[in-house]
Amino acid sequence: MDEINIKELLRYVLSKFYIVLLVLVAVVSLGEIYSVYLKTPMYNSTTKLVLTSEQTSNSSITTSDVTLSNNLVKTYSEIIKSRNVLSKVIDSLKLGMTVEQLAGKISVSSITNTQLINVAVSDKDADMAQKIANEVAKQFKAEIITLYKIDNVQIVEKATAAADPYNINVFKQTIEYLLAGLAAGIGIVLIMFYLDNTIKNSKTVEDKVGLVVLGVVPNAGRK
């Protein structure tokens, strides 16, 4: 494999820099068109729940209460996305979707070493994401009372409608498109350089043929 002359490579890249710019502009333009006109904005709305002790008359909370609540977090997280809860949400809001489709919009997470559960809902409609999140919390709370005959779930924060989509960040994505376009343009030029077998100077002739060049005919150009 021939050794690559770094100076020659840099000169070649600079001489073909217009290709890099064309690719850069094309990638950024297509990316912006996709982000602004084709990509569906998605909104996220979150409600926060807390597991409490049923003994509300006693202001003190024992270690056993906290341990029990922490153990229930995982169980409750599964109940939130159960068919019983989600089917009631669908009926209440008259959603035109299946339980499986609704479950795909919901993500449940617990905050480590706490009794808090976050229920997040994503949807292309910010108001609908808010309504679903709040209704899920409401139906889940009722389901716990039905199943366990206890009322130990409280809503700490109700969901609010998001002002901006979480999957579209024009500034961040523009930077990504710029880097991708620059890398693609330079990559194309490097491939062109590697595949270019033309003789560029007298040294190349000496290296290829093994003979000394005695003279060079200058390019006088057309008259």
Image (spheres, rainbow, N blue to C red):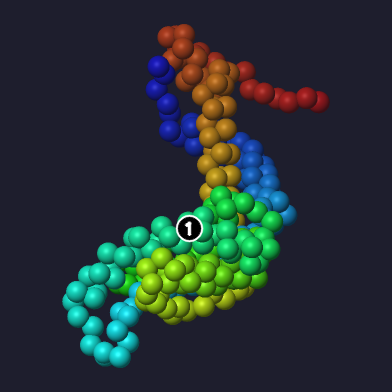
Which residue is at 57% across, 76% downward? 160
In the rendered image, which quarter contains the N terminus? top left
User: Which amino acid type is shown beneath numbered disc 1?
Assistant: Lys
- Can you name the residue that lies furthest to the left here? 63
Quadrant showing the C terminus: top right
Q: In this orientation, which residue lies closer to the viewer: 102 or 123?
A: 102
Q: Which residue is mark 1?
A: 81
Vertical order, 184 against 139 (above or below): above
**Is 149 positioned to the left or the right of 198 in the image?**
left
Q: Nearer the viewer, residue 42 or 205?
A: 42
- Please tell me whether mark 1 sits on a helix, a strand or a loop: loop
- Write the residue at 73% across / 26% down: 221
Instruction: Residue 219: give x, y in percent of width and height.
Output: 67, 23
Q: Quadrant of residue 86?
A: bottom right
Q: Position of residue 114 (x, y in %)?
A: 30, 72
Residue 71's place in the image compared with 60, above or below, is above
